[in-house]
Image: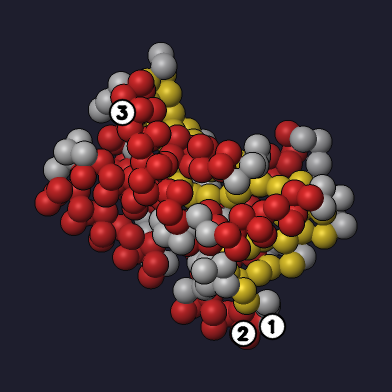
Amino acid sequence: MRLALFDLDNTLLAGDSDYEWGQFLIHRGVLDREEYEAQNKAYYAQYVAGTLDIHEYLQFALGPLAQHDPADLRRWHDEFMRTRILPMIGAKARALVDQHREADDLCAVVTATNRFVTEPIVREFGLTHLVATEAEMIGGRFTGRVAGTPSFREGKVRRVEEWLAGLGQRIEDFESSVFYSDSMNDLPLLTHVTRPVAVDPDDALAAEAARRGWPVISLR
């Protein structure tokens, strides 16, 4: 069996779901535009630059989940999927996932964005396995805190290993493993698989892929 891992934001999606979730909540009047948008843009710039403090960012990003009833959040997410996410899913991204599914590869999305935002997106691709940052819940409500290790940079490697261990497997057990990503932040997991693939990469990853002779593809 082969293992196929996919980054989500700016890889399978032509955009960033976490960033767009914040913009969506601003548009609905749930968040203050001036304050939240400025912080959101600053954190996104840090992510692109590879300087993001993930714990500081998650305290910011998970806050809105704790401030609202889960039923309202789910209702808003349905609208978010229709208006923001579906337009970011291209035919090439769907075809890539379908190619691996039809080959009976073990497939999973591995993303730093939290599970609440990403799980319905992963289902849209016909996938069941998701390795994401987990938002803590107590008594049926989000607390605004992260549960466990964030799925970011080296944390993605750890979380993938934990996920596979739960299935009674190790990455070394697969005849091959591939990871598709756009970001230099994913270098730890890219170097952990047998076949790293850069997808519409940022400048830093494009340079690294060229240096290492990694394949580069576009899903746009």
| Residue at 41%, 14% in the rendered image | 139
Choose the circle earlier in sequence order: 2 or 3.
Answer: 3
Image spot of residue 191 (x, y percent): 67, 66
In the image, is residue 112 above or below residue 11? above
Q: How is the image coloured?
A: secondary structure
What count of labels does the image hold?
3
Q: Earlier in the sequence, mark 1 or mark 3?
A: 3
Q: Which mark is residue 66?
A: 3
Left or right: where 145 falls relative to 131:
left
Disc 3 marks a residue whose amino acid type is: Ala
Regarding residue 71, the answer to whether it shows in the image is yes
CA gap, disc 1 and disc 3: 44 Å
Is disc 1 in contact with disc 2, using a CB cutoff of under 8 Å?
yes
| Distance between the alpha carbons at the discs numbered 1 and 2 | 5 Å
**Residue 197 picture quarter:** bottom right
- Label 2 and label 3: CA atoms lie apart by 43 Å
